[in-house]
Image: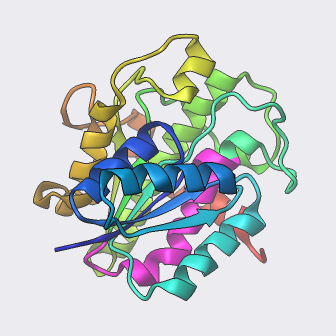
Amino acid sequence: MKKTILITGSTDGIGLVTAKTLVGLGHSVLLHGRSSAKLEAAKQQLLAVSSEAQVETYVADLSRLDQVKALALAVRERHQQLDVLINNAGVYVVPETVSPDGLDIRFTVNTIAPYWLTQQLLPLLGASGRVVNLSSAAQAPITADEMTGPSNLDDGAVYAKSKLALTMWSRHLAASIGREGPAVIAVNPGSFLGSKMVKQAYGRVGGDLQKGADILVKAALSEEFSRASGQYFDNDAGRFANPHPDALDSAKNAEIAAAIEAILANR
């Protein structure tokens, strides 16, 4: 059955390779990026995979909360149902760390934006849908108040905190909605894959992006992942595994989710 799948940050890297794989399997893909030109180039690459590919493009800067909201509204205007949301967009090194909303851009893009986008698209996803959140092997303890303003920590520290926070709210949301909502799964697609982010952060080319794309496709489509809501898949180990111990604490997970809700209140 053909599915409709939104992939954030899909003009390059794992997101684009995942999109290519999905259209090759006959699915409809909603591409997201910050640049209209890059989105058009990505769309042409998908049409080269399949001339009959169903592809839509959406422009939004996820470091701006008003554009996150606009992205959700644009998808809702065109679709009554969304089968899968893959929250792939992420940042590591940024030229400016403070967002127009007075938040840390790294936390905004990696943690807060995917939370809000997911919440606004829940009615389209329903009980049969899936939310796949790109986590990381890099996870570091975070307190709720660290997300409420700019951070003075280095890129690596903030990245690890943001990915743990993403994993924590994934588990909280899965527990909160139960079987009434989509399956929510956090996935580490693999360490040191050949993305732009890895090159920026570590100055190395990295491994085959297809490894990360394949696990995202599996998370989006396979029966195994339909029963995995609230779990964390570690693609370095090739199995479901425990995330950072803090993400196993339901009270801490709830604190992170509540902090994000407070940031988003009245926006």
Query: Which range is magenta?
Result: 108-129
Looking at the rendered structure, the number of numbered marks drawn on it comes to 0
Q: In this view, does 149 lie above or below 183?
A: above
Of 49 and 93, which appears nearest the observer? 49
**Quick check: 67 left or right of 177?**
right
The quadrant of the image that shows the C terminus is bottom right
Secondary structure character of the magenta stretch overall: helix
Looking at the image, can residue 229 be seen? yes
Q: Which quadrant of the structure image shows residue 29?
A: bottom left
x 60%, y 31%: residue? 159
Q: In this view, does 158 lie above or below 114?
A: above
x 81%, y 46%: residue? 149
Looking at the image, can residue 253 be seen? no
Which residue lies most toward the left here? 223
x 53%, y 22%: residue? 198
**Quick check: 232 left or right of 77?**
left
Q: Which quadrant of the structure image shows residue 180?
A: bottom left
- Residue 216: % across, % down: 30, 47
- Residue 114: % across, % down: 55, 58
Q: How is the image coloured?
A: rainbow
Q: In this view, does 145 lie above or below 192?
A: below
